[in-house]
Each structure stands twice: as structure tokens, then as C-alpha cells.
């Protein structure tokens, strides 16, 4: 049985990717198995754990609840697309290393996606803002403490950097 | 397949209505499919239909397209003035990822007994505008919600837009409260109320409702009527709340017994009425 | 130990974090073997049934399906999985044969080109069942009249021991007071976000099986080989697979034997990644499900005289190591308290539920919960401050090393200091005022304390204790260190990791000994054919055992370097000194050999080597756990774990008087695990342990219906705490070094989880105390709290 395939064109991490995919292929499975972007992880496949979070047109969504065909014409950013243009870790990714905001690393990509989106929307988030923003990302290793610390750290750094960039 | 227009979606539903499902945000449908609890042989993706994504304010109502994202509704500062209950309810809906993708129409069409938007629709008396290939019709919320996960939509119909009543009184207050196990979980019990008071602090208009009981969200027009003209305090609110909890007749499940739900319903119904009244009274 | 360390104990970034933040982890689901096939499982819908027939034709007819394996074939071709206790008739295979014993048990395995096709095919496998009576209540299951889960075993009781350490009856007779209580630890688990996965490939030309798995398990390659009837050196487990969290449970030996068998049988690489539904019900990773009946004898001044503990654990339909979770707590059976006489009756019973697996703490968390509820019950009975009660009974720092009645000696500690630090950090007097003022405002508010032990280091002493036929006394670990021709240092470890930061641990320790920067030290993992012996990260043992082994190997290298230098400088070993890898004559800095000089000699200039030394520069260190190696005495005493970390939790909780919703408002944990090698790693695991504890205390339960169905089999119903449920946590550190370990470090992988539920339970009970209500069953759900509160209120009304 050959399943019907649909042609899609999706901008993934800044690059246009085309493919022919079956309708039932989820977005996360397409990213992981076809594009070999294995940084996005599967934890539950029913939309609770958040490990599969990616940015869709800049907003965090659960890629296990989307089909690859639905991403046609849209922009997807996964954890691999969060680094700087030269491939170095972003301030947020570096802050995660600074405060040891991860242990097993499995929920981390989803956390980074949620935190990244938060800092875009609220550059100086409160602790409550941070916890709410990652409220849909479950972690079993860290107890969230050092993750919250990392986001605060990144916010402070980014604030400093932007202050430096401002004309005197 | 991806539908480019409402008529295209309706035409597809007409052809294959029983075996085909519309998919909007997918926040409810996709998990059910992943668990093989529902197995449509085809999906019609309506996410790209621009005509279903809008927020428009007319005199007595806010019109919201069925595929409008929940996050867009929550963010809309003009809408929050006209239908304040929507933002308040959406604060309880899932998590950011849910609201970035989930749609207003999707939540209503799914009709989970513990979902927040169906309760607001029921309480405010929202109007569902429905399309099929043979025409369109309008249903009140009371006509629309038939039971748990059951609406009056037939297999060939598509929810197109929802009209949310706007209250034009000067002193209006509202409140949405919920008790769930964790933040973002389905409500064990949810309640909301909207109240208008006159210059003397007497209630001129009030609606309230309860959800999470296992059936449909309920509004209580008869009980609300008893509150008109009163100051919305004291024992009357308490007895109205108690009566509402009895009528809700909430059931038991893994997370809460019927007894506990009935107690929560009494507590929350009273709390939302009082909170809405307090907010209204604060307005000058 | 008053050493100042250069690298140990310092704030340093870990080696592991950078690759994960970039999305470059390598988890088993990320490994794509060419031609790999996928497995999905047919699971029993019944908790107990006879399998009448299995029809696979329709499934096999689906394009893309390669094979459907049933127990008929599988159970003949493989050996039963290992069981730790003496119950040879309780046999466990990856697939059911003839009968199913729990809802979710695997009945058949489908192999297909994709997981989706395999799942489609699963639906087409027709299994006819004849349901038989089942039992899902532990107390009923103990009765002979109950349905027997394994009739050949003769009863549902798979373990029943009775230990009496010290003069228990005399102490009860002589004590001024006695109390009895029941404390129930609900069935929960640590549920990692990554499910278990395993990929296997058989190479016929080499007659070798390669396995990649998300694994944390002692003797994994050995047990896999045995079940498959292969020699040990025909199985190669790759430990360089990242494991997405384990906390004990990633023991998928049944998944592994199944997948390996299929790979060998079909001649294709095969992979199984559990989906969450399979994992929750059929992954066999549930944790302790335990009823404690406690009796305590004490005096009016609060002195604890004796304890009687009956612990009944429902291990589910099969058992591997799980019943031993009743044995490990023997190593700290009286907690951190001075109690001279203890009776302990552990019972493990089979029911038609999903089997248990080892969970973080290996039974210590439930035991600590029961002990701490007992302490607080004593305090309440005597109208004594629970802090004061603990102050009187905590072992004092001048009493170490302290021998407890069951035979373990606690190595070191200063429990009072840690408790006081925690109380100070939360500003306890102010907190009491805050609580009291909340109460006056009509709220239910409570402060909870727990003082608990985290035994660590690992030791299989409970195996022979609970099963005399099992005379395992070796519990070892190892490390190989090599310095290559370029002078770069590599440490080799022989087990997988699941976030504990072992690469950072090993490189820090090696760097400390060799006085070389850990940032330049690489740590790799050998596969199971190359690895030195390891018992894997269990029992919070790696800081001690792997750290100790890395230090031991590094010391040998250092000695070799000193030896080479002295030989070439023409002087004695005692007259040279080692600094940062260079060696010079003491007082003669000009007479010096550098690191590079010495490496070159070791690798290339054997004519300059002292006689008897190996060429090259490498050392291995393999060692047994300190204080280990003995069998239990006839009266059932034994040293189990060597080291004892300590935690003092102070928690402030408010319960909404109307909705019964609990909110954790403040959380402080005082923690002493001796010398911390990497503080951020230790703190991280403690925060995580507390989050696990919050889940177990308030949210998580594998609930079963009377029909034997798992009602909470998805994440919608099994509730993992998010960042909104876990409060901000403050950890205050204390250090009582262990005299038994290389640097004074103690283990600390289970911290937080071992004392958290106890403190939260005590806080909730303090909040309920003004109502004269109590709750001793976990999880303390909203509904359970409300039932407790409203019953108490009704009772109070009646009295008026």
C-alpha cells in the first residue's frame, strides 16, 4: 500500500525544505526522521509534556499535535535553529550552561523554545512570567529551579547587551 | 487535505461527512488520533482559511471567526473591553503552546465538559453561525451544546463564526474561576459570572454558569433572575450557588468525587458572582 | 578533611550541557540503523485471562509487516528473566504465554517497516481471551482465598521476612507510651520524559549482538545474554547512548531481550521505542506501592524506645529486583534517630497490576515518609514541638560512626547542624508567626519538617539478606585513565548516564589528582565488551565509586610519573615533588622534568623507563564498595550502604479552606552529602528530587479500577508537576565528610525525593491539626484533602 504523498515547502531554521510526505506524518516525526533534526524530542504524543515544542511562525507549538502537511508555507524553528548565525550558542543557550539548567537534556530543547519565545515577548520577565511560560514543558530532572535561573540570567545579559548597543 | 475556503471545506464534508473530520488547532483532535480513539480516514485542514480568522466588533456583539487562534483572542485589547470574560477564561486554557495553536471554534466544537470557552459561550448566550454546503444556520449556545463532547453540528457542518454578546451597561464586572489539579489542567469545576449594576449598586443584569460536571456547561437563567435588583451579597448568593451546584449534578471521575465537585461548584459559583459584583461596583 | 581543593567543590560548567542545548544529544530514538525495523506491541486488555488463541494472518497480510512474534515461540527460545528473590516459579518473559497477568502485558510483538504500520498491524492481531478472576488489592492478595497470580508459586506472597533487632518486646513493655498508625505510599514512579527504547542488531558474520538502549541497570549485558542463551561476549551494549532521565526505572530488560531476539531471528536491525501508553501500562516501571503499619514505643519526654514496622508492597504481576526495595531501607531502618530496638516485617505480594521496577531511593523514600509521619504522630500525642522531638532523638555528631540495630554503621553526620541551618534559612520563628497569622485569617496553614537519611554508595547486602540463596557480595566500579602520546588525558567509564554529570565528575576528579585542567580531560564510555566492571549508577553511588575509581587510577598515573622522573633525575621517590604534572627535585626547581618530557619517555623512550613499568601511560582501578563484601549474620544484621547523606526539609503549605487546594508557599532543604564534587550538579539533582517528591506527595498515582484497569495511563491523568506546581526552592549546604571515601564525598542522586514527601505530608498535617484531622495516605489529592477536612468539620459540628 502506498500512501498518498503531499508536496510541502517549509522554511526550517531559515532554510527552505521541500518534501513529499504522507498526511499522517506528524511534524515532529518529519523533523526528526526525515530532516534528521533530532534535537526536538517526543515524550508523550498527546500534547502534554512539551518536549516536542518548536516555533511555528515564531510561536511555541507542540509539533506532536501537528501534521507535517500543515506546516506547508510556514516557518518552523527547532532548537537547532536557536543558535547564532555563526553556529555559536545563543545567549539563552549559554545561560542554560551557566546555571546548569539541564541534566538529561531531554526536555531541554522544548524549554529553550518556550524560553526563547518568552524573551522575545517579555524581555524582562518576572519569575511568575517565566514559570507560566515554561508551564507547558515538563521536566523530571531539574525541579525547574536552575531553568528559571537561566532565563533570568539570559534576560539580564540581553538587557545589558542592548544597553551597550544603545547610542550613549 | 487543506481547504482554501469555507465552501470548499463544506463541499468535502458533504461528500464524505462521516469519515472525514475538520482539523483546526488539533489540540484536542490530534491526541485522540494518536491514542487511536478516533480514526477519521481523512482530515480537512481549515487553518489556512483567512475568512475564518478574524475579530470584528459590531454594536451588540463581537464576531470571532471559528479559526481565530486563542492567543490572538487573549491578546486583543479592544476585545477585552467588550467581552472581558474571554481573556479571563483563556488564562485558564492549557498552556502557551495550546493557545498558540488552539482555536476558538475548535474548543467549542469539541465541547469538552471541562473546557473554558464553552462555559463562557453558554453563560453569555453566544451564537454559533454554522455553514454547510446546503446553507447556513444559527444556533444559540444552549441549542449547540448537547452533551459531553457532543454538539448539534452534524457531520457535514462547519462552525464558521461565533457572536459573543457585548454588554453596553456602564458598570459591568466579570469573573472566571476554576479549580484544577495542576495549572492548565481540565477543570474539576469551573465557574464564571458577568454582572451589571446600577448607580446604587443594585444588580440590573447577571449571568453565571458552571462547568466541569461531566455533561455540558450550564448557565442558570432562572437562578440568575432571583438576583436581579439585589446587592449580590449575603445569603441569597450562597443559596443560589448551592441550588446551581445541585442542578449541575456533577459526576465522579479519577480526579474528583461528585461530592467534592458539588462542594466546589457551590464555592465557585458564589465566588464568581461576588467577584463580578465587586468589579462592577468598582466602576464609576 | 580540611583540604582545599583546586577543582573539586568549585562552581564549574559541566561538560555535558553544551551538546544538549544545541540539540545534539544522542538518545536511542536518534539512532537510525540502516534497514531498521520497528516494533509495536499487542497488549492484554484483561488483568487476568487465559489466552485461547492468537491469529496473526490479518496482521501479516498488511504490506510492510515482517513478523508477528508470540509467546509460544519466544518463551521456548529464550530463558526467563532474572528474579532476585527466591521464587523460581514466578517466571517472567517479555511476552505472555498461555496466560496474561495484568492489563497491558505484552502478548505479541509486530515488526514492520515503520512504527505506524506496526501499530496498524497490532490492531489486526486477533487474540481470544478467557478472562479469569483477578486481584488488585494488596491486602486481599495476601489471603490464600484470592486469585493466585502465579499458581505454581503457591501463594501471592513472593517475599516475607521478619527481623527483630534488639529487645523490641521489652522496650514496648517498658515504654510509657505506644502509638500505632498506618501510612500509605501510593503507587507512583519517577516517569522520565523519555520512554524506554532499545535498538538491536545481530551480525551473523561476527556472531555478535549490538545493543543501544536508554538504560540504567546493573548486570544488563549479562542478563540480556543469559536470557538469549548467548555467551556474554556475544553481546555488546553501547553505553554512549544518552539516557533521557531514569531515576532508577530504565531497566528495560524485557524490551531488550524481545528486540534482540527479533533482530537475531529476522536478520534485520530492530528498534522499539515505547510510546507513552505502552510505557505507562506495559513498561513495567511502576514504583513502590506500600502500606506501612507502624508501632512506636516512647517515653513522656519524647525518647523513642522501639519501632515495629510492617511494610506490605504490591509488586504487581511479576518481579525482577523490585522486592529488594523492601530490603534496602534496612540500612537506615531507624532513620537518623537513636532507636535501640526495631522489628521489621517486609512483605512483597503479587497482584494483577503492572510490575514494579527500581525507583529512585530503592524504597527509602516511602520508608522515610512512614518514619516521619510516626515522629510527628508522637509529637502530636505528647503535644511537643516536632522540632524538639527530633532534637532529642537525632543521633548527635559526637556519636559517629553510629551502629544501628540492623547492622549498618552510619559513617558521619551532624544532623542537628543541618536542621538548624534549614530552620535559620527559612527564618522559622517568623514562619511560625506567618502561619499563625494565616490561621487567624481563617486559612489552613502548616509547617512541616522532615529529617531523613539518604544512604548511598550502593551495596547488594540486601540481596543475601532477603534471599539467602543469592550470595552476591560484589558491588564494584572502575575507571581507566590514559594519557596519550600528545599528553592529553582521557578517562574511560563503563556505564551509561542519565543526567548525573558523570563526565564532569570523572574529569574533575582526574584533574584534581593530576593537577591538570578538567576542561582538557575527555571522558568516554567503553562498550560492555571493553568496559571494566561496573554496577551502573544506582544507589547514589557514582560520586563515591566512580569518583573513587577515577581518583585511584589517576593516582597510579601520578605515581608512575613520579617514578619516571625520579629515575631520570637520579634521586629517590621521596626527594621529588609533583606539581601540575611536572616533577622536580625538592628545593631544586632547575632539576625538573615537565609533563611533556615524562609523557615522551613513557610512550617512546623505554630505555629511560624504570625497570618493571609498562610502556605507555595508563592505569585502571577497580574496587569494591567500602564496608562491603560481607554476608548477613545469622540474626539478619549487615552493613548495607557505606555512606549516609542527610536532608532536613522545612516546608510551609497553605490549604484553601473552601476548595482544599494545597499550595506550597516556602521550601527550604538543608542538605549534607559530604564533599560535593560539582555543586551545581548536586543541587540540580536535589531540586529535581524535591520535584519528584512533590509529585508523589500531591499529584501522582497509578490508579487502578476494580476491574484491574490502569485508570491513569496517560499524562492527562497521571499528573507530573510543572514549574507552576513546584515552588522556588532554597538549598542550604552542610558538609560532614565521609571517612570512607577518597575526598570525603558521599553520594547524592536521590536527595530531595527521600525527604520531600515526608515534609509535605507533615506540613499538610500541621495545617489540618487545628481541625483535629490527619491524612497519612499519598498522594494527598484535592479530593482526599477535602474529604478529610469536611469529615473533621462535620465531626466538630456534632460535638457542639
Image: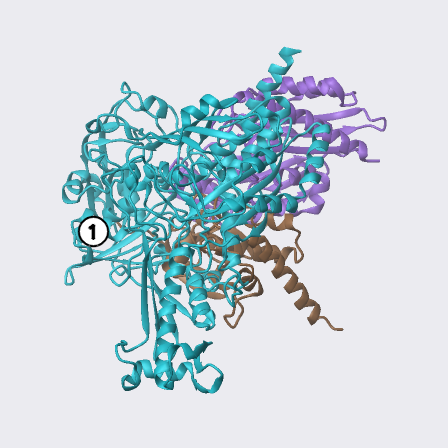
Q: Mark 1 Cα within 10 Å, few/some/many (few <14, many 20+)?
A: many
Q: Residue under mark 1: which chain is it in? A: C
Q: Is residue A82 above or below residue C520?
A: above
In this rendering, position of residue C645 left or right of residue C350: right
In this rendering, position of residue B231 left or right of residue A87: right
Q: Along the line of sight, which residue is nearer the eye, C127 or A88?
A: A88
Q: Is residue C267 above or below residue C694?
A: below
Residue for point 30% across, 52% down: C198
Q: Is mark 1 on a helix, strand or loop?
A: helix
Residue B219 visible, this angle: no
Q: Quadrant of residue B278?
A: top right
Chain corresponding to purple in the figure: B
Q: Along the line of sight, which residue is nearer the eye, C692 or C434?
A: C434
Q: Along the line of sight, which residue is nearer the eye, A136 or B120?
A: A136
Measured as percent of width and height from the top left, residue C328 is found at 37, 40
Measured as percent of width and height from the top left, residue C347 is found at 34, 30
Residue for point 34% across, 76% down: C484
Residue C285 visible, this angle: yes
Q: Quadrant of residue C348?
A: top left
Q: Along the line of sight, which residue is nearer the eye, B262 or C218?
A: C218
On-image quarter of the C terminus of chain C: top right
Q: Report the residue marked by disc 1.
A: C225
Residue for point 44% across, 83% down: C585
- Count numbered badges in the picture: 1
Q: Is residue C554 above or below residue B151?
A: below
Measured as percent of width and height from the top left, residue B106 is found at 52, 40
Chain corresponding to cyan in the figure: C
Chain corresponding to brown in the figure: A
Amino acid at each position: 500500500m502506498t500512501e498518498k504523498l503531499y508536496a510541502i515547502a517549509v522554511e526550517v531554521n531559515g532554510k527552505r525544505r521541500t518534501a513529499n510526505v504522507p498526511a499522517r506524518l506528524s511534524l515532529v516525526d518529519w523533523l526528526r526522521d526525515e530532516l534528521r533534526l533530532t534535537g526536538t524530542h517526543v515524550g508523550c504524543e498527546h500534547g502534554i509534556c512539551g518536549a516536542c515544542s518548536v516555533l511555528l511562525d515564531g510561536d511555541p507549538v507542540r509539533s506532536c499535535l501537528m501534521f507535517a502537511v500543515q506546516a506547508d508555507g510556514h516557518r518552523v524553528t527547532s532548537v537547532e535553529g536557536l543558535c547564532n548565525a555563526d553556529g555559536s550558542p545563543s545567549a539563552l543557550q549559554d545561560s542554560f550552561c551557566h546555571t546548569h539548567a539541564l541534566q538529561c537534556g531531554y526536555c531541554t530543547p522544548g524549554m529553550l523554545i518556550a524560553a526563547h519565545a518568552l524573551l522575545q515577548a517579555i524581555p524582562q520577565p518576572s519569575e511568575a512570567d517565566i514559570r507560566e511560560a515554561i508551564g507547558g514543558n515538563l521536566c523530571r530532572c531539574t525541579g525547574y529551579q536552575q531553568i528559571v535561573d537561566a532565563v533570568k540570567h539570559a534576560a539580564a545579559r540581553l538587557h545589558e547587551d542592548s544597553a551597550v548597543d544603545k547610542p550613549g | 487535505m487543506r481547504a482554501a475556503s469555507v465552501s470548499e471545506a463544506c463541499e468535502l464534508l458533504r461528500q464524505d461527512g462521516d469519515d472525514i473530520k475538520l482539523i483546526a488547532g488539533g489540540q484536542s483532535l490530534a491526541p485522540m488520533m494518536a491514542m487511536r480513539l478516533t480514526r477519521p480516514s481523512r482530515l480537512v485542514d481549515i487553518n489556512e482559511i483567512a475568512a475564518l480568522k478574524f475579530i470584528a466588533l459590531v454594536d451588540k456583539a463581537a464576531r470571532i471567526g471559528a479559526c481565530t487562534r486563542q492567543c490572538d483572542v487573549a491578546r486583543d485589547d479592544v476585545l477585552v473591553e467588550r467581552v472581558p470574560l474571554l481573556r479571563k477564561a483563556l488564562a485558564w486554557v492549557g498552556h502557551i503552546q495550546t493557545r498558540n495553536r488552539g482555536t476558538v471554534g475548535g474548543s467549542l466544537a469539541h465541547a469538552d465538559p471541562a473546557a473554558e470557552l464553552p462555559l463562557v459561550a453558554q453563560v453569555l448566550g453566544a451564537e454559533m453561525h454554522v455553514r454547510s454546503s446546503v446553507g447556513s444556520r444559527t444556533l444559540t449556545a444552549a441549542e449547540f451544546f448537547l452533551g459531553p463532547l457532543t454538539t448539534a453540528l452534524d457531520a457535514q457542518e462547519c462552525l464558521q463564526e461565533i457572536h459573543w454578546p457585548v454588554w453596553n451597561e456602564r458598570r459591568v464586572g466579570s469573573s472566571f474561576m476554576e479549580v484544577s489539579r495542576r495549572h492548565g489542567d481540565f477543570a474539576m469545576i469551573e465557574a464564571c459570572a458577568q454582572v451589571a449594576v446600577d448607580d446604587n449598586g443594585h444588580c440590573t443584569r447577571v449571568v453565571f454558569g458552571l462547568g466541569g460536571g461531566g455533561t455540558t456547561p450550564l448557565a442558570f437563567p432562572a437562578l440568575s433572575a432571583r438576583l436581579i435588583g439585589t446587592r449580590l451579597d449575603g445569603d441569597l448568593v450562597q443559596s443560589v450557588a448551592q441550588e446551581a451546584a445541585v442542578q449541575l449534578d456533577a459526576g465522579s471521575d479519577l480526579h474528583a468525587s461528585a461530592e467534592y465537585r458539588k462542594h466546589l461548584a457551590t464555592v465557585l459559583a458564589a465566588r464568581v458572582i461576588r467577584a463580578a459584583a465587586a468589579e462592577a461596583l468598582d466602576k464609576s | 578533611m580540611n583540604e582545599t581543593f583546586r577543582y573539586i567543590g568549585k562552581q564549574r560548567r559541566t561538560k555535558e550541557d553544551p551538546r544538549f542545548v544545541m540539540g545534539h544529544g544522542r538518545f536511542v530514538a536518534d539512532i537510525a540503523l540502516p534497514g531498521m525495523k520497528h516494533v509495536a506491541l499487542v497488549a492484554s486488555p484483561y488483568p487476568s485471562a487465559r489466552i485461547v488463541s492468537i491469529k496473526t494472518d490479518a496482521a501479516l497480510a498488511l504490506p510492510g509487516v515482517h513478523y508477528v512474534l508470540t509467546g509460544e515461540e519466544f518463551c521456548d527460545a529464550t530463558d526467563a528473566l532474572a528474579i532476585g528473590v527466591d521464587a523460581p516459579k514466578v517466571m517472567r518473559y517479555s511476552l505472555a504465554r498461555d496466560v496474561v497477568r495484568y492489563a497491558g502485558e505484552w502478548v505479541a510483538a509486530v515488526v514492520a517497516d515503520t512504527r505506524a504500520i506496526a501499530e496498524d498491524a497490532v490492531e489486526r492481531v486477533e487474540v481470544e481471551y478467557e478472562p479469569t478472576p483477578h486481584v488488585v488489592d494488596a491486602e486481599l492478595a495476601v489471603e490464600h482465598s484470592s486469585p493466585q497470580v502465579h499458581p505454581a508459586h503457591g501463594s501471592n506472597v513472593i517475599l516475607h521476612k521478619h527481623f527483630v533487632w534488639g529487645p523490641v518486646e521489652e522496650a514496648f513493655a517498658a515504654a510509657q507510651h505506644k502509638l500505632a498508625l498506618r501510612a500509605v505510599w501510593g503507587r507512583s514512579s519517577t516517569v522520565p520524559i523519555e520512554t524506554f527504547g532499545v535498538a538491536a542488531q545481530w551480525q551473523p558474520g561476527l556472531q555478535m549482538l549490538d545493543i543501544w538502549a536508554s538504560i540504567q541497570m546493573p548486570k544488563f549485558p549479562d542478563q540480556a545474554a543469559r536470557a538469549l542463551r548467548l555467551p556474554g561476549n556475544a553481546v555488546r551494549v553501547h553505553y554512549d547512548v544518552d539516557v533521557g532521565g531514569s531515576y532508577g526505572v530504565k531497566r528495560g530488560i524485557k524490551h531488550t531481550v524481545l528486540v534482540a531476539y527479533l533482530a537475531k531471528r529476522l536478520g534485520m536491525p530492530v528498534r522499539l521505542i515505547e510510546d507513552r501508553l505502552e510505557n505507562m501500562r506495559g513498561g513495567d516501571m511502576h514504583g513502590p506501592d506500600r502500606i506501612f503499619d507502624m508501632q512506636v514505643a516512647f517515653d513522656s519526654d519524647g525518647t523513642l524506645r522501639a519501632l515495629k514496622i510492617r511494610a506490605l508492597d504490591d509488586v504487581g504481576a511479576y518481579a525482577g529486583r523490585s522486592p529488594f526495595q523492601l530490603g534496602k531501607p534496612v540500612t537506615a531502618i531507624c532513620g537518623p534517630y537513636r532507636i535501640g530496638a526495631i522489628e521489621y516485617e517486609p512483605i512483597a505480594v503479587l497482584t494483577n497490576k503492572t510490575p514494579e521496577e527500581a525507583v529512585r531511593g530503592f524504597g527509602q523514600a516511602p520508608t522515610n515518609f512512614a518514619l516521619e509521619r510516626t515522629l510527628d504522630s508522637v509529637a502530636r500525642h505528647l503535644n511537643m514541638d516536632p522540632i524538639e522531638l527530633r532534637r532529642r532523638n537525632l543521633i548527635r555528631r559526637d556519636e559517629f560512626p553510629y551502629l544501628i540495630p540492623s547492622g549498618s554503621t552510619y559513617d558521619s553526620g551532624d544532623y542537628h547542624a543541618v536542621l538548624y541551618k534549614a530552620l535559620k534559612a527559612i527564618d522559622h520563628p517568623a514562619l511560625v508567626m506567618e502561619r499563625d497569622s494565616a490561621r487567624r485569617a481563617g486559612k489552613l496553614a502548616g509547617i512541616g519538617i522532615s529529617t531523613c537519611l539518604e544512604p548511598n554508595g550502593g551495596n547488594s547486602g540486601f540481596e543475601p539478606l532477603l534471599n539467602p540463596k543469592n550470595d552476591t557480595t560484589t558491588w564494584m566500579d572502575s575507571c581507566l585513565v590514559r594519557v596519550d602520546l600528545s599528553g592529553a588525558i582521557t578517562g574511560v567509564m563503563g556505564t551509561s548516564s542519565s543526567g548525573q554529570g558523570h563526565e564532569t565528575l570523572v574529569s574533575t576528579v582526574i584533574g584534581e589528582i593530576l593537577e591538570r585542567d578538567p576542561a582538557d580531560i575527555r571522558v568516554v564510555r567503553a562498550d560492555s565488551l571493553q568496559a571494566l566492571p561496573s554496577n551502573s549508577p544506582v544507589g547514589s553511588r557514582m560520586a563515591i565509586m566512580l569518583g573513587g575509581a577515577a581518583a585511584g587510577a589517576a593516582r597510579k598515573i601520578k605515581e608512575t610519573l613520579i617514578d619516571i622522573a625520579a629515575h631520570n633525575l637520579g634521586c629517590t621517590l621521596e626527594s621529588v615533588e609533583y606539581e601540575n604534572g611536572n616533577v622536580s627535585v625538592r628545593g631544586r626547581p632547575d632539576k625538573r622534568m615537565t609533563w611533556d618530557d615524562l609523557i615522551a619517555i613513557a610512550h617512546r623512550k623505554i630505555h629511560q623507563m624504570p625497570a618493571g613499568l609498562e610502556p605507555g601511560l595508563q592505569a585502571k582501578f577497580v574496587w569494591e564498595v567500602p564496608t562491603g563484601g560481607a554476608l548477613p549474620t545469622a540474626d539478619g544484621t549487615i552493613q548495607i550502604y557505606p555512606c549516609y547523606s542527610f536532608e532536613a526539609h522545612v516546608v510551609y503549605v497553605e490549604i484553601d479552606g473552601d476548595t482544599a487546594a494545597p499550595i506550597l508557599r516556602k521550601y527550604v532543604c538543608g542538605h549534607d552529602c559530604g564533599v560535593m564534587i560539582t555543586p551545581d550538579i548536586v543541587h540540580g539533582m536535589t531540586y529535581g528530587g524535591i520535584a519528584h517528591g512533590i509529585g508523589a506527595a500531591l499529584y501522582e498515582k497509578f490508579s487502578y479500577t476494580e476491574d484491574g484497569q490502569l485508570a491513569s495511563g496517560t499524562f492527562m491523568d497521571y499528573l507530573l508537576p510543572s514549574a507552576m506546581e513546584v515552588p522556588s526552592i532554597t538549598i542550604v549546604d552542610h558538609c560532614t565528610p565521609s571517612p570512607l571515601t577518597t575526598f570525603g564525598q558521599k553520594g547524592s542522586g536521590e536527595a530531595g525525593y527521600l525527604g520531600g514527601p515526608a515534609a509535605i505530608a507533615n506540613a499538610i498535617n500541621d495545617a489540618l491539626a487545628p481541625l483535629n484531622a490527619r491524612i497519612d495516605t499519598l498522594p494527598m489529592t484535592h479530593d482526599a484533602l477535602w474529604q478529610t477536612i469536611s469529615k473533621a468539620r462535620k465531626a466538630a459540628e456534632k460535638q457542639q
